[in-house]
Image (cartoon, rainbow, N blue to C red):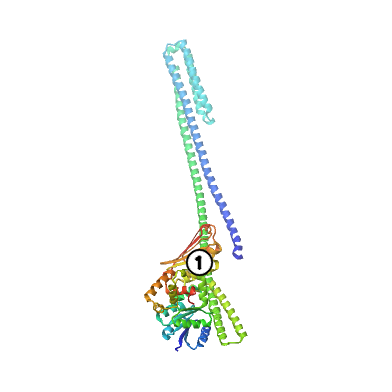
Amino acid sequence: MTGPTGKTPIASQPTAQRRLGSRIALLVGFGALLMLMAFIGADSLRTLGAFEASNNRIRQDFLYREHTLDQVRAGLYESANLMTEYLLMEPSPQSREALRVQLSSIQAEASSALKACIGSLPAGTREPFQHLATEMEAYWSTLGHVIAFDPETNARKPGSFLSGAVRQQHAKALTITKELSVLNSEDLRDAERRIAEASGQFRRRLLMIVIIGLLFGLILAGGTIGYAGRLEKHLEEKYDESLQVQQELRELSKRLVDTEERERRAISRELHDEVGQSLSALLLDVQNLTEISSGEGTLQKGLQNIKASAENCLDEVRNMALLLRPSMLDDLGLVAALEWQAREVSKRTGMVVDMVEKDVSEHLPEEHKTCVYRIVQEALNNCSKHAYAKNVRVVVRQERNHLQVTIEDDGRGFDPRRMRGLGLIGMNERVTQLGGVLTVSSNPAQGTRLEVDLPLPNA
Amino acid sequence: MKKLRILLADDHVVMRSGLRALLERQPNLEVVGETENGRSTVELVASLKPDVVVMDIGMPILNGIEATKTIVTEQPATAVIILSMHADESYVMRALKAGARGYLLKDSAPADLLTAIQAVSQNKSFFSPKVSRILAEDYVRVLKQKGGVDSYDLLTDREREILQLLAEGKANKEVATSLNISPYTVETHRKHILEKLNLHNPAELILYAVRKGIIS
C-alpha cells in the first residue's frame, strides 16, 4: 500500500515543474509574437506618415517656387508690355510718371516674392535664385534708365540703343526663369526618386520584419503543436492505463466473486456432506445401539443425550450450509432456491415475499443462477433491513435468450442518484460481468423497483 | 411372506452401512444392492427391479430427484423413498413431483423408515413427522401473513374424505370402491377439490394434505 501512495508525489513533482516551465515558455513566446506584430504595425504607420509628410512638403516647395517664378515672369511680361506701350505713345511727363509708378509697383511685387522665396530655400540651393534676383535688379535698373531718358532723344531714336538693352535684359531674365523652372522640375523628380528609394527601403524592411515574425510564429506554432501533441499522447496513455486498471479491477472483482462463491459452495458442501452425513450416520448408529441395548437405564439415557446433541448439531450444520450456499441451487435449480429464500426471509422477518416464476429453465448456466440468487438475496436483505418493506414481489421470467428479474417492495424507498451502497454496487458488478443491465428505480416513500436483464448464452 | 427387496442409494459409505445394519435386522426386508450415484441407481433398478429404493438427493453425476423421475417412468413397480437431510418444502415438493412416494429426513427415527418402506410398498405415501410439521407450520404462517381464508374450510365433508384417500395414494377406482360410489363421481370431486384448493397436480395435493396434517 505504501508503494504507490509514496511514489505518486515524487513522480508528479518534476511533471509539475515541467508543466510550469512550458507554460512560461508559451506565454513568453506568444507575448513576444504579439509585441512584434504591434511593433510592425506602429512602425509601418509611423513610416507611412513620414512619407506622406515629406511628399507633401516637396510638392508644396515645388509649387511655391513655380509660383514665384510665374510671378517673376508675369512682372517681366507686364513691364515689357508697359514699356512697349510707353515707347509707342506720345511722351509726356504725366505718362512717364504713371509708368514709373506702375513699374515700381510691379518691381516691388516681383522682388518681394523672389526675396521671400530665396529666404525659404535651404542655404545650398539659393544660388540660382540669387542669380535671377541680380539679373532682375539689372533689368529693373535698365528700365529705369529708359524712363529717365529724354523724350526727344527717345522720339528720335525709337527702339534704338535703349530699347535694345531692355530687350536684351528682358530675354536674359526670362531665360533664367526658364532654367529655374527646369531646375525646379528636376528637383521635384529628384525628391520623388528619393521618396521612391526610401519607400523601397521601407518595403524591404517591412518584408524582413514580416518574414522574421512569420518564422518566429512558425517556430512557436510548431512548439505549441508539439507540446499539445505530447500532452495528448500523455493523456491517451493515462486513459489507456486507467482503462486497463479498470479492466484489471473488474477482472479482480470477478475473480473475487467467483472465489467467494466457490469457497462458499465448498464449505457448504463440506459441512453438509461430510459433517452432516457423518452426524446422520452417527444418529443412525446411536439409534441402532438404543434398539440393541434394551434395558440398562444409564446407557439408554446417555444414548438419548448423544442423540439430542447430534440432532442439534445436525440442524446447526444444515442451517449453516444453507446460509452459505443453498444446496437447492445446485440440486434443484434457481427457482427452488429462490422459493426457499423467499420462505426463509418471510419466516425470519415477517415480510410477505411473493415469488413468481415464469418459464425459467432448471438448467441455467451456473454463473447466471448464482448471479440472480445473490441479487435477490441482497435485494431481500435491503428490503427488510433498510426499506422496512411489508410486501415484496420477486418475479423471475425467462424469455427466449433473456432472464428478467424484478424485485419490487413497498418500503420507504430512497434516491438512487444520491445513495449507492456497496450492496447495489456489488449487484451491478455481478450483472455487468454477465453482460446484463441492472436498473434501480426508487423514490423516497414510494418503494423500490429493481430490474435485472441478463442475456443468456445460446445453449 | 416374501421379503421386500431394497436398494440403497447414497454417496456416503457410513450412511449406507448404517442403513444396511438397520434394515437387515428386519426379518421381512432384504438389501439387494447399494449405489453411490444417481446414474448407477437407475441402471441397478433396471436390472435388480427392487421393490423400494431408499434414495439420497445430493449425489454426484445424477441427483436423487432426477434419478427418481427416470425410475418412476421406467420402472413404475419400484417405489422411491427420499431419505434426505433437507427438510425444506422445495425439496419435498420436487421429490413428490418427481414421483417419490415417501420423504424422510436422515435424522428421523429408524422406526419411521421401516414404516415408510411398508407404506410405499403398499402404494401409500409417508412423510417424516418433522417434514409434516415444517410444512404445516409454513402453511399456517403464510395463511396468517396473507390474511387469507383457509381453503380447507371450503371443502365439503365428502370432499375431505376423498382428499384424504387420494393423498394416501389411492387411485380413483380404489376410492370409488371404498366409498361405494362411481369412479366418475370421484373424478368430479377430485376436480372440485383441486379447484377449491388451487392445486394443479397430485404432488401438490399430497403436499397440501401433509401440510394440513391429513396424512403423515
Q: Which of A178 and A381 lies nearest the eye of the viewer?
A: A381
Which quadrant of the view contains residue A12? bottom right
- Counting from the top left corner in percent of width and height, residue A210 is at 49, 46
Where is the C terminus of chain A found, in terms of image quarters? bottom left
Q: Which of A407 and A243 lies nearest the eye of the viewer?
A: A407
Q: Which chain is home to disc 1?
A: A
**Total numbered labels:** 1
Location of mark 1 (residue):
A376
Quick check: A104 above or below B36? Answer: above
Which quadrant of the view contains residue B175? bottom left
Q: Which of A48 and A135 lies nearest the eye of the viewer?
A: A48
- Counting from the top left corner in percent of width and height, residue A296 is at 61, 87
Quick check: A23 above or below B121? Answer: above
- Counting from the top left corner in percent of width and height, residue B141 is at 52, 69
Residue A326 appears in the figure: no
- Counting from the top left corner in percent of width and height, residue A339 is at 49, 69
Q: Secondary structure at mark 1?
A: helix
Where is the N terminus of chain A found, in terms of image quarters? bottom right
Q: Amino acid at mark 1?
A: Val
Residue A60 appears in the figure: yes
Q: Residues within 10 Å of mark 1 (few under 14, many from 20)?
A: many
Q: Which of B168 and A225 lies nearest the eye of the viewer?
A: B168
Quick check: A196 above or below A416? Answer: above
